[in-house]
Amino acid sequence: MKRNSFLNNITIGKVFVVITVIFFVALFIYAETHKTTNLNTDSTAWNEGMILGDRSAENTLIEYTDYFCPYCNEVNEATESNNFKKDYIDTKKVRLENRVITILSGVSVNTEQGAEAAYCAADQNKYWEYSKDIVSHIKADYFDKGIGVKDVAFPKKINKLPIDYFTQSAKTVGMDTKKFEDCVSSEAHKGEIESNTQKAVKLGVNGLPYLAINNYKSSGFSGGYSGLLNVLKAGGVK
């Protein structure tokens, strides 16, 4: 009886060891197949037309954005300031990369068309000029009136906009409007936009604006230009 008991203990011990090994191997495989890429290692530009500044800049500030995100509008105003361009872009301390994605499409009916407009503007090397113009119009027409903004007493959504709304800015900045409209209406960049949006989600982007620079990342934004400076400082920009 003692011998059998001893053998049983050995067998149980072997089974336990095998199960433990299988568990840790499975855990390792799961971790490898589900691990999230670190935002700060994803340094390859997603769209060359959406980069402002020199490639040799010391730091890259990445902004995940959407034309119909009111807080993204605040980041745009900060990065468009002459001080930012003079002190950080022109001195090659920072280059700015925008990544237009559509994680807000469930709450904004214009997000996807706005993203198409952004990519189509980049096709004509007019992304920054176009963005400055269209964002200023969206702000004046909607955000300043409490439309498309959550934190108001009676929030209202921006209705679906016609393509003409987007074409006005294309015309203002000297784009080929026929080419632009064909690009937007055919959803020429739909696959790329969807792929980039999925990639952003896997990287941990869970709200907009989402900023990343070096080892620092931030969801949300406030404080205007001072807030931007705080982000740069937190990211190690001197």
Image (cartoon, helix red, strand yellow):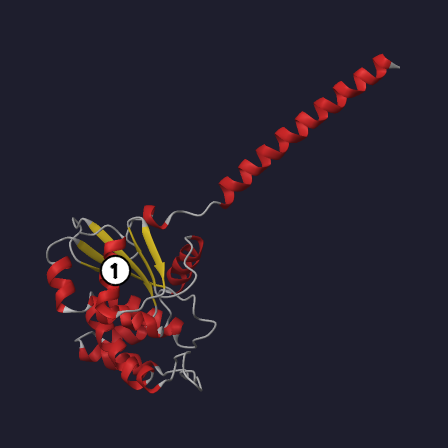
Q: Is residue 77 left or right of residue 42?
A: left
Tell me where residue 194 sits by quadrant. bottom left
Q: Is residue 175 left or right of residue 12?
A: left
Which residue is at a point 25% across and 70% down the rendered structure image? Answer: 224
Tell me where residue 98 appears, x and y as whole percent.
28, 61
Which residue is nearer to you in this view: 97 or 232? 232
Mark 1, residue position: 230
Residue 3 visible somewhere in the drawing: yes
Which residue is at a point 43% across and 69% down the rendered structure image? Answer: 104
Task: Check the image and report above or below for 225 versus 155.
Answer: above
Please state which amino acid type lies under the numbered disc 1. Answer: Asn
Tell me where residue 89 appears, x and y as whole percent.
15, 58
Tell me where residue 6 sits by quadrant. top right
Task: Check the image and report above or below for 157 versus 94.
Answer: below
Count of numbered circles on the image? 1
Under circle 1, the secondary element is helix
Tell me where residue 173 appears, x and y as whole percent.
18, 76
Quarter of the picture holding the N terminus? top right
Tell me where residue 75 sits by quadrant. bottom left
Which residue is nearer to you in this view: 36 or 227? 227
Tell me where residue 232 appears, x and y as whole percent.
24, 56
* Residue that protrudes farthest toward the right in the picture: 1
Number of other residues with Cα within 10 Å of mark 1, as a class: few under 14, some 14 to 19, many 20 or more = few
Residue 126 visible somewhere in the drawing: no
Which residue is nearer to you in this view: 209 or 180? 209
Which residue is at a point 70% across and 27% down the rendered structure image? Answer: 16
Which residue is at a point 39% across and 79% down the rendered structure image? Answer: 149
Q: Is residue 194 left or right of residue 99?
A: right
Task: Check the image and report above or below for 157 versus 57.
Answer: below
